[in-house]
Image (tube, rainbow, N blue to C red):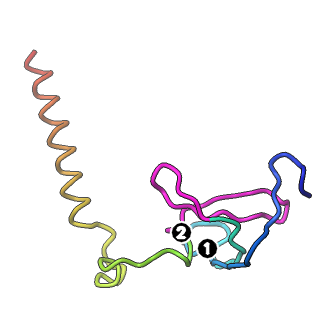
Amino acid sequence: MSGNAGRYESSGDVRRFRITHPFHPLRGHELEIHNLVTVGGVPLVCYITDASTLVSIPVSWTSPRSVDDFERVSGGRSPWRIDDLVALRGIIDAHLESSATHDRE
């Protein structure tokens, strides 16, 4: 299988993960990790399909994801983090201010 464009073979130590995202079609399946990478600040887990194609999905959709203090304390009851909400409010305020300035011109 090696040598085919777009096809990869797994090598090195075998580590496994489970897809945990509730809407992913492979939810619950356990797969071998080919590689862990970060693209655009998003950590991804890469795996090889049965068709020898390299696929990547966000680590946050899988079992290897790290659970931070917020998730541990909230127990998954809240998807909204205070820091994210404050940042969103800043974006909205800046947009409203820009719109108001544009309307006055």
Circle 2 Cα neighbour tier, 10 Å, few/some/many (<14 / 14–19 / ≥20) = some
37 or 85, nearer to the observer: 37
Name the residue tied to disc 2. Answer: 61
First-in-chain label (2 vs 1): 1
Q: Position of residue 1 (x, y in %)?
A: 92, 58
Q: Quadrant of residue 91?
A: top left
Q: Quadrant of residue 33?
A: bottom right
- Number of the label disc, if any, that sits on residue 95: none
Helix or strand or loop: what does disc 1 sit on? loop
Q: What type is the residue that disc 2 sits on? A: Trp
Relative side of 32 to 60, left or right: right
Q: What type is the residue that disc 1 sits on? A: Ile
What secondary structure is the magenta-colored segment mainly?
strand
Specify the farthest residue to the top.
105
Q: Position of residue 95 (x, y in %)?
A: 19, 36
Q: Is residue 80 magenta?
A: no
Over which residues does the magenta segment extend? Answer: 36-60
- Number of the label disc, if any, that sits on residue 19: 1
| Cα–Cα span, label 2 and label 1 | 6 Å
